[in-house]
Amino acid sequence: MHYTVPKGSITGLFRNLQNLGYTVVGPSLSEGVVRLRELTGPADLAAGVVDVQAPGRYSLGKEAPLVFSSVNGPDSPKRYLHPADVELSRLIDGGGCIESVSGFHSNRKYAFFGIRPCDLRAVGVMDRTMLMPGFEDRVYSALRNGAIFIVVNCTRAGENCFCASMGTGPGAESGYDVSITELPEVLLVDVPKRSASLFQGIELKPATKAELRAGEEMVQRARDQMGRRIAEQDPSKQMYAAMDSPAWGRVAERCLSCGNCTMVCPTCFCNTVIDRNDLRDGSVSRVRVWDSCLSKDFVYSAGGNPRLQRMSRYRQFVMHKFAYWPDEFGTYGCVGCGRCITWCPVGIDIAETVNSVLRDQLAAEKKMEAHHVA
Amino acid sequence: MPRLALHSLTRGTVRGVKKETPDTFTLLFELGDGRTPADFMAGQFNMLYVFGVGEVPISVASFGREEHVMHTIRSVGRVTSLLTALPPGSHVGVRGPFGNGWPLAEAKGKQLLVIAGGLGLPPLRPVIEGAIAEPGRFDGMKVMYGARTPADLIYTYEYPRWQAANGCDLLLTVDRGASDWRGNVGVVTTLFPKAGIDPGRAVAFMCGPELMLKFSILELTKMGVPAERIFVSLERNMSCATGTCGHCQLGPLFICRDGPVFGYPRVRGLFPREGV
């Protein structure tokens, strides 16, 4: 059900979330970048801050008279639901055996406040891997189970966004606990029944037809603004045929193998467990840290290293998003958030990679055909 | 069906050590939770943890009716060099079993081809021992095993028993011979014409280096063994063993979760293929 509330009601919403035991996480300005931070109140929100993004570029522009003015910073809910550095267990060598003295435990409930529709969809993508029946990840499931999502629909497209191509935005259709579209004067909110308690003490005015239409039009404007797109409607199947496309090598020549793309990607989950030895008491902390398929040693094993070439590692990153994930789960691993484009130090554009890989493959096939005819 | 202990560490106490080659050792473990080899399927693997150092995936080499859980380990890295130096009585952490195991039912009543290279033999050892313990299960078994040199062959002390077993033929080969080597020299596929393979009723289980698998698949296919009856156990960097770390990914497959044993049609196009 759609309602409108005054913009000032965010204060009440914050209070309700905190009273319900949630740790509120949302966009906040930090050292010139909009990060997802734990917020103590509405004043911590990056209200009015406008981010300007381009391949390999991030800066802040002129302020805008909006509460939800920035698009996407480098953080996504991944930073909280699948932490970059988390202790899985602490072990001691009890002489006769290895004993676990503590394991991961959390009763923290996150309320993601002001995340964008693409990031909500990214959580759904991450769920497939981390909550696969029989293989549930205990850290992710503990943090994920308590989380709620207050999503803000996009009324402006970032320069690197291509969610419309991926079908993940700019408006959220389902899966949220509250969705907000910021109109010039009020907030248009969709509050499913189960979320009513979040609006306790806040007057919800049923939205008028004109307000609903205004919201739709603003989201449509963001869709129309989006310059970046994947040319093919459903590229997953063609990607396999294009695995030897010459475009891979061309793009990989620019790739530094730094792994920034995988760190900022809201669906990249790869990790490694390391042992941190405590010399004071002899205990060992088994810590899980983010890892990246762009790293040279990522697939190294006694049998060799199947991805020594940088091209093969970069191809793995893109194929996983655009071919392997669809094969495994029937959903793309990419949500079109554009972060990997912004935070790539050399500005490699994943949408352009997919487009050129498929274009070159098609050209090569046409050439072959012509050859046969001749 | 064995219990799947995704994260809990079981104590594994070393009860026996055998030196296979200068750098490869077989360790026999007694498990703290009372599980025996019967709780592990042929082709599955365990994660072995050395306190304060790390974990490695190692195939289960024991056969269900044996007393101890057996692992054969080559010393190549930080963790395996410590594992292979463990004296009897010492202990490690054991997590597992993981993976799907060999499709023994699919091979029932057929001619079973066991094709292994180097350290690809341990995950097939329970298959061999199982076939010997139950002679009528397969319509003959051909074990074809290759190593770099005669000194690299493992389980040599078992060969006389395997050779003597009813319905079992053991064929050995080495890449490079030695002065006292009278056997076959050449890659494992050079054994195929000598093995009496019947393509019409053969089922192949194979494990070894990727190149060996590649050429074995090619040869078997040429001989007329259909892809549906070729099964490979793949090695990748299994790190979490639960399909959530990404290290062992092969296309849409996670070797730890979906494998390590695959029917060839499932991996064709992705394996063997450079850089995937």
Image (cartoon, coloured by chain):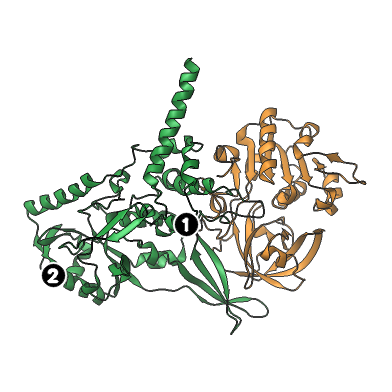
Chain colours: A green, B orange
Q: Secondary structure at mark 2?
A: helix
| Residue B105 in view | yes
The reply, left or right, for residue A352 in relation to residue B49 is left
Which residue in the structure is indicated by mark 1? A259
Q: Quadrant of residue B270?
A: top right
CB under 8 Å between discs 1 and 2: no
Q: Earlier in the sequence, mark 1 or mark 2?
A: 2
Q: Residue at x 47, y 36 (%)?
A: A242
In the image, is residue B226 above or below residue A255? above
What is the residue that sits farthest to the right in this orientation?
Answer: B180
Which amino acid type corresponds to the residue marked 2 in the rendered image? Gly
Q: Position of residue A229 (x, y in %)?
A: 31, 42
**x and y percentages locating residue B24 in the rendered image:** 77, 58
Identify the subunit bearing mark 1.
A
Task: Check the picture and name the quadrant holding the N terminus of chain A.
Answer: bottom left
**B173 displayed left or right of A228:** right
Is residue B108 visible in this depiction of the protein? no
Closest to the observer, A42 or B232: A42
Residue A8 has which mark?
2
